[in-house]
Amino acid sequence: MASRPEVTPKPKIALEGEPVLEFQPAVDLGSGQVLGFEALLRWAHPTRGLVPPGVLIPWAESNDCIVELNAWVLDEACRQATAWPSAIQLAVNCSLVQLRRHQASVAAARALHHSGLNPDRLTVEITESAVADERANRDLVNLTHHGVHLAVDDVGTSWSTLESLRRFSIEVAKIDRSFIAALEPQEGMNRAIVETIVHVSHSLAMSTVAEGVETAEQVRILQELGADVAQGFFFAPPMGGDQALALATREPPGRFELTEPAQQLAPTS
């Protein structure tokens, strides 16, 4: 197991507190094996506690510090991932602002250099709107030139995205949690949408990740529809870096049960 590089300096932002990362496992729907973690940004405020992304990200964008904040997330997430086994992947979200300013590829290259993480272990997650944004396109291409993978988040909210995926080396489609939450056991609109996303993604040689999975029934339906990977509270909520490290390095490797919710953060083997 590799040792972690030195701690990433915190970004200098005019907001009380400091940024922290949490990690949510991505689980193989065939075996229950942990394939990787998505890094999730939180802000620890001294009096308000953890500021959720829905509040933090709009604030950072309106105060012109989102690029610096996203760069820190890439740096710190890559640093922590170096201590995981080489088979465990890392996913990091990227903002449209970063892409439009052509800073996402710069930040990714710097994070990989600082940490020494293999580029093949890093997936940068972008939004549907970024795929369709001409100003962001050049940086998407630059990201692939660095050897990292690309994933599109919240797929299904705009059908035009599926056609746009042909223009880039997108490898992963993450199905929006709203469709997963309303999945019908037999027939229904949400089930049809998820099935279509899985089918189209596989036809484009892309894998699929279902977000927001919370029940065994959702797991069963997703398996039936051929989805590849899932993440959500059914398996584990976002966890701290030390918990993620313990889960990633567990011997023998742990596997989540796929028929009943996990009873603890680290699954039984």
Image (tube, rainbow, N blue to C red):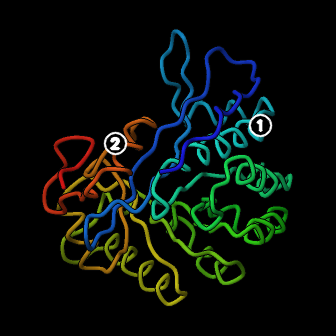
Mark 1 element type: helix
Instruction: Name the residue furthest bottom.
Output: 203
Pointer 2 or 1: first along the chain? 1
Viewer-proximal residue among 53 and 139: 139
- Left or right for 59, reference 102: left
Q: Residue at x 67, y 61 (%)?
A: 129
Viewer-proximal residue among 82 and 41: 82
Instruction: Name the residue furthest left.
Output: 260
Residue tagged by mark 2? Answer: 237
**Other-residue count near label 2 (Cα within 10 Å), few / some / many at <14 / 14–19 / ≥20:** some
Q: Residue at x 75, y 23 (%)?
A: 13
- Left or right for 121, reference 130: left
Q: Amino acid at mark 1?
A: Glu
Q: Residue at x 77, y 37 (%)?
A: 68
Residue tagged by mark 1? Answer: 68
- Left or right for 198, reference 260: right
Task: Answer with the quarter of the image where residue 186 lies.
Answer: bottom left
Residue 182's x, y, as percent?
30, 60
Residue 256's x, y, as percent?
23, 57
- Left or right for 139, reference 208: right
Q: Amino acid at mark 2?
A: Pro
- Mark 2 near mark 1, Cβ–Cβ under 8 Å? no
- Number of marks drawn: 2
Residue 180's x, y, as percent?
34, 61
Q: Quadrant of the C terminus?
A: bottom left
Task: Answer with the quarter of the image where residue 263 lies.
Answer: top left
Q: Residue at x 47, y 38 (%)?
A: 22
**Other-residue count near label 1 (Cα within 10 Å), few / some / many at <14 / 14–19 / ≥20:** some
CA separation in Å, label 2 and label 1: 26 Å
Mark 2 element type: loop
**Marking on residue 263:** none
Instruction: Name the residue furthest top.
Output: 47
